[in-house]
Amino acid sequence: MTIFEQLSSYDHEQVVFCRDEAVGLKAIIAVHNTTLGPALGGTRMLDYPSEADAVRDVLRLSRGMTYKAAVAGLDLGGGKAVIFGDPSMKTEAMFRAFGRFVDTLGGRYITAEDMNTTVEDMGNIRRETRWVTGSEAAHGGSGDPSPVTAWGCFHGIRACLEVTYGSPDVAGRTVAIQGVGNVGFWLAKYLHEAGAKLLYTDVSSKRLAKVVDSFGGAVLEGDDFYRAEADVLAPCAIGGIINPRTIPMLRAPIIAGGANNQLDDERRDGEALSSRNINYAPDYVINAGGLINVYSELKGYGREKAMQDAANIFDTVKRVINKAKVEGTTTAMAANRVAEERIAAVHRLKRVYLPRA
Ligand code: NAD
């Protein structure tokens, strides 16, 4: 496929190829859709095996951001950027040069941290453009997004409980968490405070010991996570874990957690879950707290407001699951439709004539 064929298959507005040989910068900025607002999405740095891989990655990820922002009800479009190269070779000059390219877009694209980029890199970008989020909390930035992401997940879990059992009450429910890192640990804290019984699995015995020490609960080994007799499985580690191998093991009626790309194949695995009546909270809907957190930064950051906004994920998850039931589709497809319908409706807005003063 040519690059223009790829742009048309993903339906992109604009893709910018950036090059500054003097500082070793090669980057791509993809602006997928700005119907709802500026395209916000992180910049990742990776030693891509080929340029084609980098193009595919930036197109796929920027489109994902459009959907995530649209379903979350934010006034944001979707974008993403990739910088080619080994992250150990990054320099101040490289990120400043990248910042100048971001600046040329005049706010159509707003960047943030992503895989292999840090608060310090965002600081270097900020020296050249104001279209960047993710500075340190001490400097008015939004700081670590994980507590907000986990708070959104907690409310997404409550929504799933309500749809499944008729009550969002977490007390006495059993939740199995896969991955007790940044998001999983905070999620365990909120669930524990709300009276849930907790089960955990992680590849890190240190992290498991910390979470059990903090909130009690029991540890599950290997595939016992999938077989857990729990009310909710909350994947908070890695992607692709819901697949034809693991689906037959599932006993829990709800899958709701913070990890990205939980379904190995969105259509196939989404259909398998729905045919087993398992309520799956689409990952990009339930884990939107991180995006909500950086979005708040654009409006003058306050952690309390970001947490309140993330709690609205309760309504969004309920709406998506109910839409899936009404329309006879999977929750993943229903979420995509919510996004597409909102974008199409706003796209139809007419411009209002304002006489000049
Ligand atoms: P993290 O690295 O802090 O935590 C991940 C945890 O998963 C670690 O404790 C790790 O040991 C464990 N883990 C890794 N492989 C595992 C496996 N095979 N089985 C069990 N445990 C395993 O990462 P995080 O920031 O907590 O993010 C977790 C997930 O949530 C990721 O998919 C991330 O993309 C997604 N996410 C995070 C945020 C955020 O705000 N941090 C926002 C949106 C989405």
Image: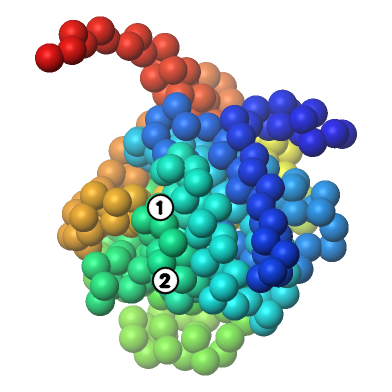
Q: Going 52% across and 81% down the picture, which residue do you hit?
A: 219
What SS does tag 2 mark?
helix
Q: Residue furthest left?
A: 357
> Can you identify the residue that label 1 sits on?
131
Say few, some or many: other residues with alpha carbon within 10 Å of mark 1 (under 14 / 14 to 19 / 20 or more).
Answer: many
Q: Going 84% across and 63% down the picture, which residue do you hit?
A: 49
Residue 108 seen by the camera: yes
Q: Nearer the viewer, residue 8 or 239?
A: 8
Q: Residue 6: where, in percent of width, then height?
A: 77, 33
Mark 2–mark 1 Cα distance, whole angstroms, equals 11 Å
Q: Earlier in the sequence, mark 2 or mark 1?
A: 2
Q: Residue 185: where, in percent of width, then height?
A: 41, 75
Q: Residue 161: where, in percent of width, then height?
A: 37, 47
**Image quadrant in which the C terminus is located:** top left
- Amino acid on which disc 2 is placed: Gly
Q: Going 52% across and 67% down the picture, which residue do you hit?
A: 96
Residue 238 seen by the camera: no
Q: Residue 83: where, in percent of width, then height?
A: 66, 61
Residue 227 drawn above or below residue 248: below
Q: Residue furthest front?
A: 22
Q: Nearer the viewer, residue 167 or 283?
A: 283
Q: Is residue 141 left or right of residue 8?
A: left
> Can you identify the residue that label 2 sits on?
123
Q: Is residue 103 left or right of residue 75?
A: right
Residue 46 quadrant? bottom right
- Amino acid on which disc 1 is placed: Trp
**Image quadrant in which the N terminus is located:** top right
Q: Is residue 325 left or right of residue 295?
A: right
Q: Nearer the viewer, residue 228 or 327?
A: 327
What SS does tag 1 mark?
loop
